Image (cartoon, grey):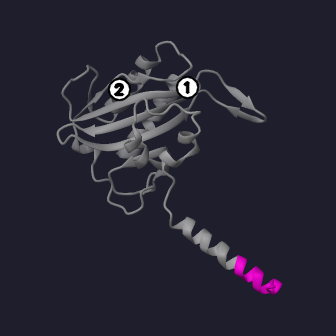
Amino acid sequence: MKHPVIRTLGMTVATCLVLAGAAHAGPDRYIDSSDYKKGEEIVGKFFGDEEYKLIVDDLERVDRDIELDWGWVKHSGKKPDKVKDLTFSLSDYRSIRIARPENHAIEMADGIEQKVQEYFTRVFERAGLTVATEPGAAADLALDMAIVDLKSGATSVGWINIEPFIELELRLTDTAKDAVLLLARHQSHSSDPAAAAGKMAGELVRFIE
């Protein structure tokens, strides 16, 4: 039988090795998350598994103090969840096509697809881009989206108040190169789902500017 001190020391070393391994394992990817595996979230309607393998938990633009819940972006750093220098700049582009989002949410909200498109249009126009909304219209960038969840009313879970929200999957593409620049699955909260979409559009532009 091992001496208690030796046994404790062995357990401590083993614990440190496990924690060290976890520290170097890299960020969680959506395809490995409980959100994907438990079947409680809407998945596979817009993104596929190849995209779910790419997007990581809490994608952070470290110099902007902004995070996307789940995301992937083309950047020059080595850490997939810590982004500083992108390999593209929004200022390199003059126009963007913003499609009306697909809607796969269970809860319905009247006109939400048009409202989401309108909010994103306004925000990208303020960022200096010419926006086209017609399907197939020529543009330097294309932003395609899908609504995967929304909640129109505030709810409470115990003492926690949950504001109305919208959750989107987004794909930003350089059309000339046919290259995906950014993927995100992100949720924003506000007074209603449409306002939350406007908030998300602002967060997205801040992330990629």
Residue 204, x across and y down, in percent: 41, 39
Which quadrant of the figure contains the C terminus? top left
Secondary structure beneath dot 2 equals: helix
Q: List the single residue furthest toward the top.
A: 110
Q: Which residues are magenta?
A: 1-11
Secondary structure beneath dot 1 equals: strand
Task: Kindly identify the amino acid type of the residue bearing the numbered disc 2.
Answer: Thr
In three-dimensional space, the C-alpha distance between marks 2 and 1, rounded to whole angstroms, equals 20 Å
Residue occupying the point 49% across, 38% down:
186
Residue occupying the point 73% across, 29% down:
156
Q: Quadrant of residue 189?
A: top right
Image: 85 above or below 24: above
Q: Nearer the viewer, residue 46 or 66?
A: 46
Label ID, residue 30:
none
Task: Kindly identify the amino acid type of the residue bearing the numbered disc 1.
Answer: Leu
Image: 84 above or below 100: below
Which quadrant of the figure contains the N terminus? bottom right
Q: Is residue 7 magenta?
A: yes
Residue 205, x across and y down, in percent: 38, 40
Residue occupying the point 40% across, 48% down:
54
Is the residue marked by circle 1 packed among few (<14), some (14-19), or many (20+) residues within 10 Å? many
Query: In the rendered view, does 33 fall on the left or right side of 4?
Result: left
Label ID, residue 150:
1
Residue occupying the point 57% across, 23% down:
192
Q: Is residue 95 magenta?
A: no
Is the residue marked by circle 2 packed among few (<14), some (14-19), or many (20+) residues within 10 Å? many
Residue 198, x across and y down, in percent: 46, 29
The answer to whether residue 74 of the structure is visible from this angle is yes
Q: Which residue is mark 2?
A: 121
